Amino acid sequence: MKNSLIYYDVGAYRSPVFPFREKSHKKFFKKYVGIDPFFEKQYEAKGKYIYYGCAVSDEEGDRIFYLTPPFKKCRVSSSLYKPNEEVQGKRGVPFASLEGTKQVKCRKLSNIIKENGGDIDFLKIDAHGSEYPILKDIESYMDEMVGIQVESWFYNCYHEVHLLDSVCDFFKKHSNFSLGMIFDEPKAFGDWACDLVYINNNTNKVDKLNLIKKLYGINDDTIMKSEERIVSMLTKVIKYG
């Protein structure tokens, strides 16, 4: 299965792709499209690696981008959504303060996919608030995907952000997808967010689905435990006023 996966990575600069941090794993990419407003160039192609220096949401155009303090030399928690400093302070979130703003180019992911041939196998979204609008934008592509990894929020750490319950409700409408894995290690996510990995059980790309399962460690046990855990995790969701 070398050179087989067409992988889209939203939030590529700020969060290295899991499980593709190891160089040996990159051999599985047929095409890798990384998107992040902190890339210096608006567009850059290096063989099978394509990079877009822009933000992603459900509309095209220039948007205000809210800058948070640097963490490990990168403003990892900056967002198209204004940080909710009161909520972040209550929850002890380390990126609570707002340091400034800048204008960024914003693209629809559906348009970027079209520009690159219209094919996609796997999507990772780590966009600090824009996850739900991105999911809505790419709904027409979901049947051809083998899986989606999406960051989800327990609290409205950003103004107007959709929370974990909205993401779960979205996938309930797409019954061919089931929850395969949850990443919520406190060291990486604190108690305010988690990553959900959904897999497409009706895909005809069986070899690619099996590859994703192998790389992520998804099996019948993780699927069962994830389905059990998500019920209790939904009780943590709090929408502060």
Image: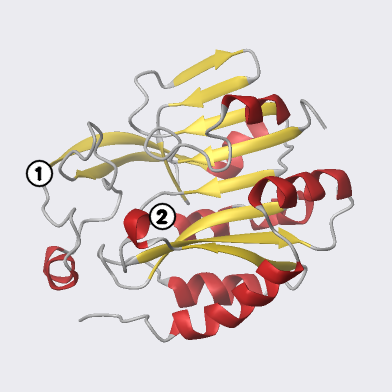
Residue at 67 percent across and 54 percent down: it is 217
Residue 137 horizontal side relative to residue 184, left or right: right
Residue at image position (52%, 56%) is: 150
Name the spot of residue 154 as percent of width and height, x first: 36, 73
What residue is rendered at 52% in x and 31% in y?
34
Q: Secondary structure at mark 2?
A: loop
48 with respect to 136 (left or right): right
Secondary element under disc 1, as helix, strand or loop, is: loop
> Few, some or many C-alpha atoms within 10 Å of disc 2 (few <14, some 14-19, many ≥20)?
many
The image quarter containing residue 158 is bottom left
Query: Which picture quadrant has residue 193?
Result: bottom left
Question: In the rendered image of this protein, does residue 143 appear above or below residue 16?
Answer: below
Identify the residue at image location x=73%, y=48%: 214
Q: Which residue is mark 2?
A: 130
Front residue of this view, candidates 150 and 218: 218
Q: Which residue is mark 1?
A: 99
Going by the numbered disc 2, the residue's amino acid type is Ser
